[in-house]
Amino acid sequence: MSEQPQQICILGGGFGGLYTALRLDQLPWERGMRPEIVLVDQRDRFLFTPLLYELLTDELQTWEIAPPFAELLAETDVRFCQGRVVDIAVDQQQVLLDGQAPLAYDRLAIALGGITPRADIPGWSEQALPFRSLVDAECLRARLRDLERQPERDKIRVAIVGGGYSGIELACKLADRLGTRGRIRIIERGTEILKGSPEFNRQAARQALSDRQIWLDLETTVTAMPKGAIALDYRGRTDEIPVDLVLWTVGTRAVPWLTQLPLKQDERGLLVAEATLQLVDHPELFALGDAAANFDASGQRIPATAQAALQQADFCAWNLWASLTDRPLLPYRYFPLGEMLALGTDSAVLSGLGLKLDGPLAYLARRLAYLYRMPTLQHQLAVGVNWLTRPALTALSQLAL
Ligand SMILES: Cc1cc2nc3c(=O)[nH]c(=O)nc-3n(C[C@H](O)[C@H](O)[C@H](O)COP(=O)(O)OP(=O)(O)OC[C@H]3O[C@@H](n4cnc5c(N)ncnc54)[C@H](O)[C@@H]3O)c2cc1C
């Protein structure tokens, strides 16, 4: 009688989940010991979020940054299941899906990412556009096209709430897309943009905003979003400013139903994991990426970034494998590689590993680093060949030589 293979379920096909699945598939399993690996995601495609802005300027196409899971997993033994996870029956070791049969698991990796939290501001639900998913980017493109097609509209006024990475990158890309028609302002509650970034990056970002005449409202809070306007409070004085679009880039929080599970969470509802990425009191459950409140083996808190999720994916895959093959599990160590930001359609800035670069060369370096980070060699090749044959990048690569 043959034994049933063990089941590994990976929830979420983002940077944490997809890369865990791909890595797990490559690990050596003894004959007859290979488990069934199932990757579950509500969408049919992966999204390389750091390049999402490039869809707004047509620098990149959807297939390049959002390849379908079916394509990415075609050469692997990983089974893809498209479905929306609605609950995890921890005691029964089952994942509950919306409208589909439950999935049983022996090991479960939770990599469901986060969501943009709703703000308790009048008009927020009607006016604020988040920028997190492919649907958000497509919705923004449609709104921009609509505004651009109105010849009577002299200026297109965009308010971007949040002066973090997303706010700055969005502002520069939109300014380059809209040109002289654009009137862009960033609204930031703090006293500075890019809090926590290296000064070199912050300085380059400030310069890029100033070159594009992007208005910066620091120490300013959004108090209301009536139709066609935004109310801003600066040191107790409120002004209402007319706007055509409000983009909301602030915050990340846990997927709401995850916070209802009988699993240890931090004050933000993120799953508390050990350095091995196993959940406290549940060694069969692993959590990584934005859904988890992870501390690495040296006790440092792991940032909610693709960079960290990718590094965790390697450890998660290894530890899933080790836990099924009676080997010791490895504690995760986060290795910060630095940060990169796109500053418009021809410039970027990066700091890390002792290197500081800005301008077109940084733009090229960022693109190449992301190409290297894309999932599967086949996809990297398809995208790389496409980039080489596209005029804009060819011009830039000539500049670099
Ligand atoms: C616009 C943007 C730009 C960014 N730029 C950078 C950058 O330059 N550098 C950087 O390091 N980080 C960047 N980040 C952050 C980075 O994207 C995240 O930290 C990273 O994606 C986290 O990986 P993850 O696997 O935890 O979640 P995700 O990559 O978000 O993946 C979560 C997956 O879970 C799926 N999912 C969620 N809920 C369910 C459900 N109920 N059922 C089924 N599937 C579900 C989602 O569809 C998604 O595919 C950026 C984020 C955004 C939004």
Image (tube, grey):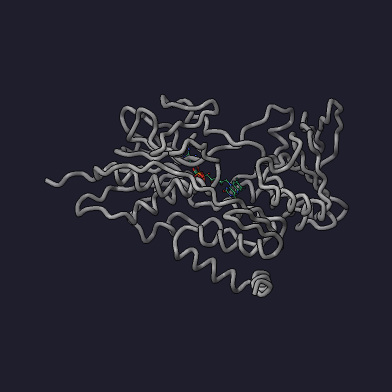
Give the residue at the far left of this rendering.
Answer: 1
* Image quarter of residue 86: top left
User: Which sits in the foreground, 85 or 324?
Assistant: 324
Q: Position of residue 146 (x, y in %)?
A: 75, 52
Residue 240, above or below 11: above
Q: Position of residue 191 (x, y in %)?
A: 76, 36
**Residue 161 in sight:** yes
Identity of the residue drawn at 48% across and 56% down: 68
Identity of the residue drawn at 69% across and 52% down: 141
Q: Position of residue 247 (x, y in %)?
A: 71, 42
Give the residue at the far front of this rendering.
Answer: 354
In the displayed structure image, the side of residue 263 where residue 93 appears, left or right = left
Identity of the residue drawn at 72% across and 55% down: 173
Identity of the residue drawn at 58% across and 58% down: 62
* Image quarter of residue 211: bottom right
* Image quarter of residue 368: bottom right
Point out the image quarter for the N terminus: top left
Quadrant in which ligand 1 is drawn: top right
**Residue 99 in sight:** no
In the displayed structure image, the side of residue 310 where residue 203 appears, left or right = right
User: Which sits in the foreground, 32 or 359?
Assistant: 359
Residue 144, above or below 289: below
Q: Position of residue 33 (x, y in %)?
A: 22, 49
**Count of residue discs:** 0
Point out the image quarter for the C terminus: bottom right
